[in-house]
Amino acid sequence: MPSEGRRYDPAALPVGMPKRLLLAALAAALFASLIGAPSAFADALTPESGGSQNADDIDTLYKLTFYIGIVVFLLVWGTLIWSLVRHRVRRGGTADQIRGNTPLEIGWTVGAASILVVLTVVTFIYLDDIESPPPSGPNGLSASSSQFATIDQPDPPGDGGPVLRIRVNGQQYIWRYVYPGEGQLFSYQEMVVPTDTTVVLELEASDVIHSWWIPKLGPKMDAVPGHVNETWFKIPADQAGTELRGQCAELCGPNHADMRATVRAVEPDEFEAWARDKREEIQAAGEAVAEQREARDPQAETEGN
Amino acid sequence: MHGLRDPQRGWLKWLTTTDHKKIGILYLFATFLFFILGGVEALIMRLQLAQSSNTLVSPETYNGLVTMHGTTMVFLFVVPVLAGFGNYFVPLMIGARDMAFPKLNALSFWLLLFGGVAFYASLFFEPPQAGWTMYPPLSDDAFTGGGGVDAWIFLIHLTGLSSILGAINFIATIHNMRTRGMGWGRMPLFIWTILVYSYLLVAALPSVAAGVTMLLTDRHFGTGFFDPAAGGDPLLWQHLFWFFGHPEVYIMILPVFGMISEILPVFARKPIFGYKAIAASTVAIAFLGLLVWAHHMFTTPTPTVVLAFFMLASFTIAVPTGIKIFNWIATLWRGQIVMKTPLYFAAALPALFTIGGISGVILAIFPVDWYLHDTYFVVAHFHFVLFGGSVFGIFGGLYYWFPKMSGRLMSEFLGKLSFWLMFVGFLATFLVQHSMGLEGMPRRIYDYDEALGVETYNLISTIGAFILGIGVLVTVVNVLWSMKNGRPTGNDPWQGNTLEWFTSSPPPPNNFDVVPRVRSVEPMKDIRREVAAASVPAETVAQPVAPRSL
């Protein structure tokens, strides 16, 4: 290449003020975009949240780590770009023959380690709030609810309403929700839950591994055949009427992308009414099926189902 | 005069060769071919996702593409391309005349190639569709029939055997065949990382070999290792797979760290900053890398104390990795940086890997991972470390060593064009994928709901992917063009530090007629200094270091 010689020519490199200005402008632009970006696209840089306290805690934990990450990013990119621009080859220049600097090296090792110690401490501070289900709120599902009270008493301290335990069963490509209480109560795809009530999900799968996730409700958990996994959420009282969407997060077959889920939050009263209607509906449907079966084959009833 | 014996002529010499340089070239050609195949698969996926409700490919085809792309890039590109560079340059850099076991070396290559061919043959019946992680029960015959998964198992066994044999060969070569004077403290950092890469392969591969054998017998011989109905457990697979799979991540990045630890000092005209720290942190990363596998399983039913252990273990890896990044920047600091294409790619690595490292720390916090796991945030993370880290470094190595392998320089214009296209394309493709994940888009889906609000991100990502693809294509053109038309180069076009630059380009079959005695980690710099001392007037020699400014 004929131009090869010229590339080494230090005279061709910009020197002095213009370069420094360019660099300053570059740094300013980078800084401005980083400051501006979180406010303009806050949504694009942080997790969804707002549907449950544990989702909000995850959001906070993420943001803390993210801000520390931004500082590290600026430090690394800043010194790297500075070195590449400032220390280009120039006529008569010599490279400093530095082989190491023990205090500096110990310094950044300790620096990196202490950032991680801070992150560890912060994580453990938030962990319990994210992991352990709190008691239900005062406006949640009533402890005296005839349908659910007998089964889902709060944990021993008992300082809240009952916790609603729902069995969530993943199967290609739909979620099935089984509610507690007398008489069958189950639904598919759309999970109806009372607000201000702690809902504990017991996740299981009947074919392949699935993963339960509603972004606004925070954690996702895998539903693994042969295991029962747990997660929880508690939708605030003022969010009655909201519908939260999510989908299966673990590849579960060709139609994995179509395995959607919805959580609909309603007032506890409305929830109880829904549950009562649904139980009756299911019972009626079951009886209808049994009748049909009996009409076709009287033996079937005795063979069990 | 250099020949050990008469080399065979024509294409036959490539089939029968046991010369480490020819085998290295075979590795590089084969793996770059697989890289292009894997890249085309990625571009088809990106096209499908460019907008929601797209019908370019069926869900089955999409899952096939996901599986083929991941498997190809990991098992048929990044791991073996490093074996290719290692094959070519380990003997040259340690002043040896070949690998310890040349025939075993040839076997390693052919096992790899036939593993790849067996895997790609599944395109003609039914490609595997369960993802490169092949989680059962989905990968059991009840849910994924056809021969695709079996072809994948065959690939793992063949490439695994290839890697283990290659690793043993590297270990034997590096321990026994270093030239006079090259003690452990004078070994080039690339050699350090290839040695650690080899030990990691030997430690990690048996686990996945056992896993895929159990999967094979589950599928065809009625066992139930992973079937809960038969007393097995799907999580057993995940442990076996990730006990291999996470060290694999370091297998894919450590030799690349070694490469740029060679490239940066050469182009900064400075010694590497903290040689011992880089070598020691490589060993530390490898050891810790064996202890973090379950951070891929944070959302499985696992006790909190186990989750906490794997979070802390993952955190600790950030320390030696951070040390390396600071060392590289300190190597550039106050250098006389020669802005050639290899430097561009090598300097991009610390920049991009830092972003992947930061997102890695975020993902290691298991409560946060409960949100981010299996989303596009993870996809962005591992492309920043695997593409931004490994692939950019590998391209740096290609531009750095091409003159040695071919005797010709590559076009600087095409090289820099390729770099900028790849750099911009890469950032456009993968930065927005963080946001997709944060918005709630899971990975491995052939379609997404418009209401998710990720359509713009996906379009940007797709456009970026094509810019990236064009960038790669420019390098392919550059290689093909420069092989014939590149400017002929001497032994040492870059003023390198290590022994491969002592011999001619390309090196003769016996590598060296004479090997200089090694007195430091930069033997070539010593030789240049001696030559200069012998040929310049005495007063200049009296003051070897010129004043900083004139």
Image (cartoon, coloured by chain):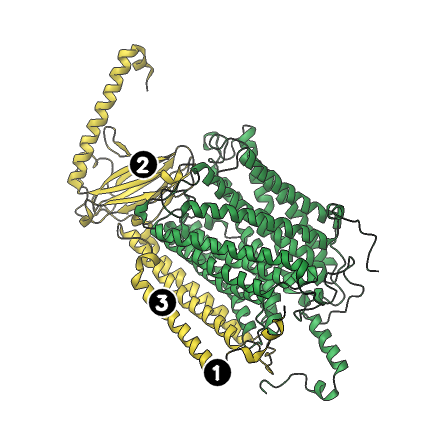
Residue at mark 1 to residue at mark 3: CA–CA distance: 26 Å
Residue at mark 2 to residue at mark 3: CA–CA distance: 46 Å
Crowding around mark 1 (Cα neighbors within 10 Å: few <14, some 14 to 19, many 20+) is few
* Quarter of the C terminus of chain B within the rendering: bottom right
Q: Residue B382: which numbered mark, if any? A: none
Q: Residue furthest front?
A: A2
Q: Amino acid at mark 3?
A: Ser
What residue does disc 3 label? A33
Dot 2 falls on a residue whose secondary structure is: strand
Q: Position of residue B315 (x, y in %)?
A: 46, 59
Quarter holding residue B211:
top right
Please say if B438 is above or below A27.
Answer: above
Dot 3 falls on a residue whose secondary structure is: helix
Colour assigned to chain A in the rendering is yellow
Q: Position of residue A132 (x, y in %)?
A: 31, 49
Please say if B250 is above or below B266.
Answer: above
What residue does disc 2 label? A167
Q: Nearer the viewer, mark 2 or mark 1?
A: 1
What residue does disc 1 label? A16
Q: Earlier in the sequence, mark 1 or mark 3?
A: 1
Which chain is home to disc 3?
A
